[in-house]
């Protein structure tokens, strides 16, 4: 198996990894780097559990070749709370009981973060659209949508 060097930014830190050609970013994150916050669901681009942020946009890491991340800025769930304090989206999911088994939660939160970064005051429909590629088998989606809107509201408040 041929390996190639890939330099990229992962959760604000420079990373230099040797990855097998043709391997996925999902595999690199979980199997090489031990970042289990990125969930492996369907492995075929239908569930959204493996969503990460690449250069500010949500991407399915199961469909992204690791070698294509050269020079990119990758954020996983672990990058949202680097100092241990929860990100407002994580807090809103906890407070609003928007996670049950939790399997979809990292992908939902990262998809939502991309939305709120570009649109701090989304409508409910815009939230629904932003998470339309993420499947949840537990919650019925309503608590997730409510948590994202709550987090958006909190993030818009000026800091005191
Ligand atoms: Fe990537 Fe399901 S594991 S979309
Ligand atoms: Fe279980 Fe969403 S909380 S799949």
Image (spheres, helix red, strand yellow):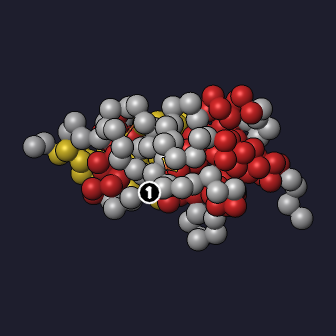
Residue 106 percent across, percent down from the top left: 51, 51
| Residue 121 drawn at (x, y percent) | 80, 38
- Describe residue 14's horizontal placement relative to residue 111 as left or right: left
Quadrant, the C terminus: bottom right
Q: Residue furthest bottom?
A: 84
In the rendered view, would you say 73 is above or below 91?
Answer: above
Please state which of residues 55 and 42 is positioned toward the viewer in this rendering. Answer: 42
Q: Is residue 54 visible?
A: no
Does residue 19 show up?
A: yes
Q: Is 107 displayed left or right of 50 in the figure? A: right
Q: Residue at x 72, y 28 (%)?
A: 125
Q: Residues within 10 Å of mark 1 (few under 14, many from 20)?
A: some
Q: Residue at x 56, y 65 (%)?
A: 82
- Residue situated in front as seen by the camera: 106 or 64: 106
Q: Residue at x 35, y 47 (%)?
A: 40
> Going by the image, does 110 lie left or right of 50?
right
List x then y, in percent, for residue 94. Answer: 64, 61
Question: What count of labels does the image hold?
Answer: 1
- On the image, which quarter does residue 22 sit in? top left
Mark 1 lies within 8 Å of ligand 1 (Cβ measured):
no
Disc 1 is placed on an element classified as loop
- Badge 1 is on which residue? 37
Q: Quadrant of residue 1?
A: top left
Above or below, 18 against 56 in this view is below
Q: Residue at x 70, y 61 (%)?
A: 95
Residue 13, percent from left and from top = 47, 59
């Amino acid at each position: 198996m041929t390996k190639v060097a890939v330099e990229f930014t992962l959760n604000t830190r420079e990373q230099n990894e040797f990855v097998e050609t043709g391997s996925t970013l999902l595999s690199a994150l979980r199997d090489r780097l031990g970042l289990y916050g990125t969930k492996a669901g369907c492995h075929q681009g239908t569930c959204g559990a493996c969503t990460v942020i690449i250069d500010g946009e949500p991407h399915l890491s199961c469909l992204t070749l690791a070698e294509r991340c050269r020079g990119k800025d990758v954020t996983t769930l672990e990058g949202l709370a680097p100092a241990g304090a929860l990100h407002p989206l994580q807090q809103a999911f906890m407070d609003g009981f928007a996670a049950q088994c939790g399997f979809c939660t990292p992908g939902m939160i990262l998809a939502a973060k991309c939305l709120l970064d570009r649109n701090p005051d989304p409508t409910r429909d815009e939230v629904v659209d932003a998470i339309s590629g993420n499947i949840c088998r537990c919650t019925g989606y309503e608590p997730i949508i409510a948590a994202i809107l709550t987090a958006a509201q909190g993030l818009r408040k000026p800091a005191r």
